[in-house]
Image (spheres, rainbow, N blue to C red):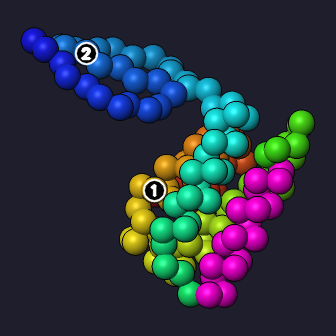
Amino acid sequence: MTFNIRNQTAGVINNVAGNQHVGVQQGHVGTDDARRAVAELREALQTVSLPPEAEAEARTHVEQVDADVKEPEPDRSRVADSLRRLTRLLSSVGAFAAAGAALIGPLQTLAAWLGELGQPIMQLLA
């Protein structure tokens, strides 16, 4: 059997031929990953058409998240608050329907980096 798999990105990926029995697996999302996700999120927002007020508010949230994750020891609760507000805003204006994975991917990465604080964001994205 041959596998041809390209461009997979995740904390843990298992590709098997046949049966696999898996226990607990966890990937690690580090602060550098979070910083890259903020840059990806900023880029994705540039491709989405939002109402002017929503666009300004979204930009403000992203800039706050960016400033917070650039700190030597980021305050994850502040990041979580800003990210939760941003996710609710984007959901309310239909941005996920327009941009889909381009927005959801970086938001999921940031939520994973937040750990337990990111769970409400993951639920909003589900």
Do the residues under discs 1 and 2 have CB atoms within 8 angstroms? no
User: Looking at the image, which residue is at 60% across and 66% down?
Assistant: 87
Give the farthest residue toward the bottom. 52
Q: Alpha-carbon neighbours of circle 2 within 10 Å: few (<14), some, or many (≥20)?
A: few
Residue 16's tag is 2
SS for dot 1: helix
Residue at screen point 57% across, 51% down: 40
Indicate whether 96 appears above or below 33. below
Q: Is residue 28 above or below residue 89?
A: above
Residue type of the residue flagged with mark 1: Ala
Give the magenta-colored segment's residue range: 52-68
Query: Residue 115, position in %: x, y?
Result: 68, 39
Q: Is residue 77 left or right of residue 53?
A: right
User: Which SS type dominates the magenta stretch?
Assistant: helix
SS for dot 2: loop
Quadrant position of the N terminus in the picture: top left
The quadrant in which residue 14 appears is top left
Q: Earlier in the sequence, mark 1 or mark 2?
A: 2
Q: Quadrant of residue 42?
A: bottom right
Residue 123 in view here:
no
Q: Residue at x 56, y 87 (%)?
A: 51
Q: Amino acid at mark 2?
A: Val
Which one is in front, 44 or 61? 44
User: In the rendered image, is residue 99 in sight?
Assistant: yes
Q: Is residue 23 left or right of residue 75?
A: left
Magenta span has 88? no
Residue found at the very far right of the displayed protein: 72
Q: CA distance from mark 1 to mark 2?
A: 28 Å
- Residue 56 is inside the magenta segment: yes
Residue bearing mark 1? 102
Question: Where 31 sits versus 79, above or below?
Answer: above
**Location of residue 62 in the rendering, given as x and y in whole percent from the top left corner:** 71, 62
